[in-house]
């Protein structure tokens, strides 16, 4: 029996839950492990769709809800929410005392959870470390979480090297692929007619799935870029446009307003706070292209052989498949990229594209590492200098 028995998994948004779900399923069904599921962040916000309900509908018992409130989408408001998350999560972790805590990604709620785990002296397992996204504060948060973590599950060998470069011992860093790709081939998705009913939207000759998040390292730049994106989308003819709303980040409220205004003026466009995993992946299957600056366009879209128009530098630095078209956040450049992405020639070109993040069975690989732990994960770490024997 492994020394790790109580595993606490923290989810703070629809995005990380969708990726964590395959691992949650495996932890829950393993008799040697006890899952402690903590739900926080935008999951508990009506503005972002109360997505905790999707978790419950999937049959998971939510052991703890940690509400961190919202003081707005300003810098001060986000900092206030992060402070609340640190206070409340540290109180919870010190009370429930898991053997290990699992975090995915790079949002400020996860940084608060990592710091709380450090303070409470609980080993931390981090998923998707070592990646880069130069246009967002997520970049610094991701690397900070790496330094507070004890086991690392990365998606590619290049990211493993970067985590080691940050001073983490190679024996602690495991290449597993992208967790969110587990089971995509076997996922039962909605047929076109069923998806149209779910969306309340008639699909068209062309269909675009659009997700644009705030550009958090460039103050007041998010709305300018969104304005350019919407201007490009306005020029698309015979096109249905499916918006998924932005993350709970700085300047997100203004983007909400701009999307809603666009949708009111365009009958073939509709916006959703949260589609849920099955509907979202079904949109990916039926879309002619994914548009915006979300990591989903980098990580998941290539597995569906779908083009991605990646706008701006929010995802700059990530390993990319050939199906991704990068463009500057200017309406002419975005429109040209959209025309190219939805052309028959480009779709034919990427018909056999390989997803560099798909290594198969990430959740199973993580579980093997967890179940091999026959002693408690040591909290003390020695900084690993490159060139050490």
Image (cartoon, grey):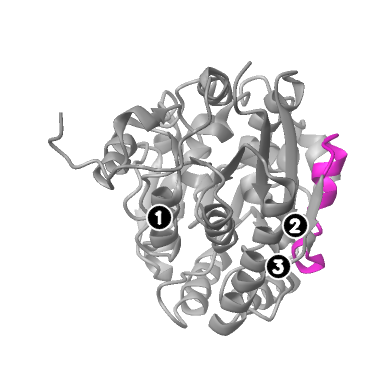
Q: Is residue 286 visible?
A: no
Q: Quadrant of residue 101?
A: top right
Q: Residue at x 54, y 20 (%)?
A: 361
Label of residue 43 in the image: 2
Q: Residue at x 66, y 55 (%)?
A: 12
Residue beneath disc 1 = 315
Q: Sequence order check: which comes first, mark 3 or mark 2? A: 2
Residue interval drawn in magenta: 45-62
Q: Residue at x 50, y 22 (%)?
A: 369
Q: Which image quarter is the N terminus in?
A: top right
Find the distance from the CA under tag 3 to the CA under tag 2: 29 Å
Q: Is residue 316 left or right of residue 208?
A: left
- From the top left corner, tell me how far across and down residue 86 is, in percent: 61, 65
Q: Is residue 278 left or right of residue 248?
A: right
- From the top left corner, tell me how far across and down residue 151 is, in percent: 45, 36
- The magenta stretch spans residue 306: no
Find the distance from the CA under tag 3 to the CA under tag 1: 28 Å
Is there a contact, CB below 8 Å, between mark 3 and mark 1? no
Q: Answer above or below: position of 220 versus 229.
A: below
Q: Is residue 123 visible?
A: yes
Q: Secondary structure at mark 1?
A: loop
Q: Sequence order check: which comes first, mark 2 or mark 1? A: 2
Q: Secondary structure at mark 2?
A: helix
Q: Nearer the viewer, residue 328 or 256?
A: 256
Frontmost of labels 3 and 2 is 2
Residue beneath disc 3 = 266
């Amino acid at each position: 029996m492994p020394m790790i028995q109580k595993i606490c998994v923290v989810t703070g948004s629809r995005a990380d839950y969708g990726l964590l779900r395959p691992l949650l399923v495996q932890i829950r069904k393993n008799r040697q492990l006890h899952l402690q599921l903590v739900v926080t962040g935008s999951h508990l916000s009506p503005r972002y769709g109360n997505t905790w309900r999707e978790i419950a509908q999937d049959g998971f018992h939510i052991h703890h809800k940690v509400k961190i409130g919202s003081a707005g989408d300003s810098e001060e408001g986000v900092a206030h929410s992060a402070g609340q998350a640190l206070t409340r999560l540290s109180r919870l972790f010190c009370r429930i005392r898991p053997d290990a805590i699992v975090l995915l990604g790079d949002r400020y709620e996860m940084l608060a959870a990592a710091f709380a785990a450090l303070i409470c002296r609980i080993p931390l397992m981090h998923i998707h470390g070592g990646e880069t996204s130069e246009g967002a504060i997520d970049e610094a948060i991701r690397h900070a979480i790496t330094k507070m973590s004890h086991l690392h599950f990365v998606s590619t060998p290049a990211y493993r090297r970067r985590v080691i470069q940050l001073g983490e011992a190679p024996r602690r860093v495991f290449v597993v692929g992208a967790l969110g790709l587990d089971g995509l081939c076997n996922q039962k998705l909605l047929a076109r007619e069923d998806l149209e009913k779910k969306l309340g939207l008639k699909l068209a000759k062309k269909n675009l799935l659009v997700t644009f998040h705030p550009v958090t390292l460039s103050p007041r730049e998010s709305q300018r870029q969104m304005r350019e994106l919407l201007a490009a989308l306005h020029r698309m003819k015979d096109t249905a446009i499916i918006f998924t709303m932005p993350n709970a980040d700085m300047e997100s409220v203004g983007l909400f307003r701009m999307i809603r205004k666009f949708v009111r003026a365009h009958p073939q466009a509709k916006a959703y706070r949260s589609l849920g995993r099955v509907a979202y992946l079904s949109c990916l299957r039926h879309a002619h292209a994914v548009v915006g600056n979300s990591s989903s366009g980098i990580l998941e879209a290539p597995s569906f052989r779908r083009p991605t128009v990646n706008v701006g530098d929010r995802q700059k630095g990530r390993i990319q498949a050939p199906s991704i078209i990068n463009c500057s956040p200017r309406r002419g450049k975005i429109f040209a990229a959209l025309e190219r992405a939805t052309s028959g020639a480009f779709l034919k070109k990427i018909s056999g594209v390989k997803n560099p993040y798909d290594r198969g069975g990430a959740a199973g690989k993580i579980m093997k590492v967890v179940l091999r732990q026959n002693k408690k994960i040591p909290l003390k770490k020695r900084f690993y200098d490159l060139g050490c024997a």
